[in-house]
Amino acid sequence: MSKFVISPHFRLQEWVAEEKGYFKAEGLDYEFRDNYGPGDVARKHATPNRIGAYQSIEQGRACDVSGACHWTVNVAASTGHGKLYA
């Protein structure tokens, strides 16, 4: 399996899984996209809600694992913007 790129964008579960070693325990090859880390939200995301998950996928955002809401993923997939799993 190829390397996973994880972009947590404001969700806690990825950071908890990383801290507890769940990804490594499963033998996954992964990396976190350096977008936002714990405590960095206010500093790095000064213009919230200017662009959503759909717009970033539409523009070709490289991310293998994304927690975008179901409708966003469905809209992006139905219009041919990338693959959800390769």
Image (cartoon, rainbow, N blue to C red):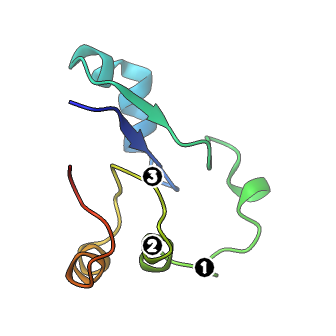
Q: Secondary structure at mark 2?
A: helix
Q: Nearer the viewer, residue 3 or 69?
A: 3
From the viewer's perspective, is 62 left or right of 2? right
Determine contact: label 1, label 3, CB under 8 Å: no
Kind of residue indicated by mark 2: Ala
- Residue drawn at x 27%, y 73% as measured from the top left: 73
8 versus 52 height, above or below: above
Q: Which residue is mark 1?
A: 49
Q: Nearer the viewer, residue 6 or 37?
A: 6
- Give how far apart the Cα atoms at labels 1 and 3 are: 15 Å
15 versus 60 height, above or below: above
From the viewer's perspective, is 73 left or right of 61? left
Looking at the image, is mark 2 or mark 3 earlier in the sequence? 3
Residue 70 position, x and y percent, is 23, 73
Residue 17 position, x and y percent, is 35, 30
Q: Which residue is mark 3?
A: 11
Q: Which mark is residue 53?
A: 2
Kind of residue indicated by mark 1: Asn
From the viewer's perspective, is 18 left or right of 48? left
